[in-house]
């Protein structure tokens, strides 16, 4: 019995060690401290190889994310030299999220694991509760929850919307809203609520995965110059994106929510449109 308890505690330590490594890697990559990221990942891979009799797919997936993010930054530097408008560069930059996505999918498939548990058609009639997703003082269907969440976001952004300064007759502006919102919203959801959430669920279970995937998502915005407080608010949003994904069995509701949130951010000026 004592041996079994000891093994359970060791397994728990391995699990949370990888979870906090995940948070550390996200922060380090946002500050471009890749040497420290690789050192931590290498140390964890060696440790798990020697000490732990468990799959190392999560650590290798994070290594793939780090390499993919480095390629993203390199690609971003290259496109800045191209004779393109700033808005076009912003759209292409978001498209570069394909690099960490593809690198992670490749590594996960090498381990013969499912890279996305939530690529199915959503169950719109599944229920979700507020404020704790699985429980709370109010429970509604996914469809109703999504409508309420988008309405709350719109109401929160209304004081900051600057519709007067935008020329809605400008096809370039409308194209920017459409392309940026769809590309960013879709690729971020595939990365965070598709790949990362799937791997975290496999590592630590649904409830822990919801919290840590949301935290990682929020902190991934540090590189854009957002404050820690605003990134933590994004993390809260990320928790509910993950919750609606798990409860519906699909990333589609989160993609719809995320795309519209991006539209609100552009119209409020939090994401700047520069048409030259």
Image (cartoon, rainbow, N blue to C red):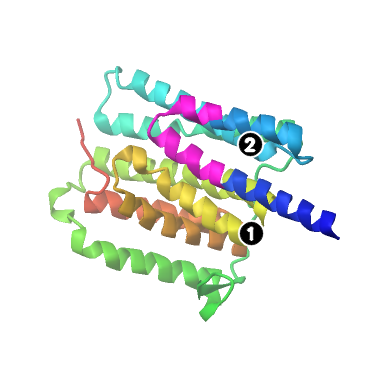
**Dividing the image into 4 quarters, which one contains the N terminus?**
bottom right
Dot 1 lies on which element? helix
Q: Is residue 191 visible?
A: no
Quadrant where the image shows the C terminus = top left
**For the point 30% across and 18% down, which residue is it?**
82
Question: Where residue 18 appears, x then y in whole percent?
Answer: 61, 44
Q: Which residue is mark 2?
A: 59
Left or right? Give the position of 237 relative to 113: left
Look at the image and say whether residue 38 sits in the magenta stretch.
Answer: yes
Residue 195, image quadrant: top right
Neighbour tally class for label 1: few under 14, some 14-19, many 20 plus, Cα within 10 Å: some
Residue sitting farthest toward the left: 165
Question: What residue do we see at 38% from left, 31% from top?
Answer: 93
Toward the viewer: 207 or 92? 207
Residue beneath label 1, please?
206
From the top left corner, tell me how far across and down residue 38 is, in percent.
54, 27
Does residue 173 lie above or below 120 as drawn? above
In this picture, which residue range is highlighted in magenta?
20-39
Label 2 or label 1, whichever lies nearer to me, is 2
Residue 192 in the image: x percent, y percent? 53, 46
22 is higher (above) or lower (below) than 164 = above
């Amino acid at each position: 019995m004592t041996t079994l308890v000891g093994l359970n505690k060791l397994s728990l330590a391995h699990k949370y060690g990888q979870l906090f490594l995940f948070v550390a890697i996200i922060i380090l990559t946002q500050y471009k401290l890749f040497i420290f990221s690789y050192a931590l990942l290498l140390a964890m891979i060696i440790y798990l190889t020697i000490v732990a009799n468990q799959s190392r797919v999560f650590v290798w997936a994070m290594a793939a994310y780090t390499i993919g993010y480095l390629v993203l930054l390199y690609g971003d530097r290259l496109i800045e030299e191209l004779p393109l408008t700033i808005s076009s560069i912003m759209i292409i930059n978001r498209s570069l999220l394909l690099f960490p996505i593809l690198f992670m999918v490749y590594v996960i498939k090498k381990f013969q694991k499912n890279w996305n548990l939530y690529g199915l058609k959503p169950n719109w009639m599944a229920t979700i509760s507020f404020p704790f997703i699985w429980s709370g003082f109010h429970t509604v269907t996914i469809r109703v929850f999504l409508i309420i969440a988008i309405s709350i976001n719109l109401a929160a952004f209304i004081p900051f919307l600057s519709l007067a300064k935008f020329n809605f007759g400008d096809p370039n502006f409308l194209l920017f809203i459409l392309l940026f919102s769809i590309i960013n919203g879709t690729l971020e959801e595939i990365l965070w609520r598709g790949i990362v959430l799937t791997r975290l669920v496999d590592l630590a279970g649904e409830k822990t995965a919801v919290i840590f995937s949301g935290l990682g998502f929020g902190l991934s915005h540090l590189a854009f110059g957002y404050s820690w407080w605003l990134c933590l608010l994004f993390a809260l949003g990320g928790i509910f994106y993950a919750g609606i994904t798990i409860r519906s069995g699909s990333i589609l509701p989160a993609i719809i929510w995320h795309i519209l949130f991006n539209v609100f951010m552009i119209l409020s000026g939090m994401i700047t449109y520069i048409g030259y």
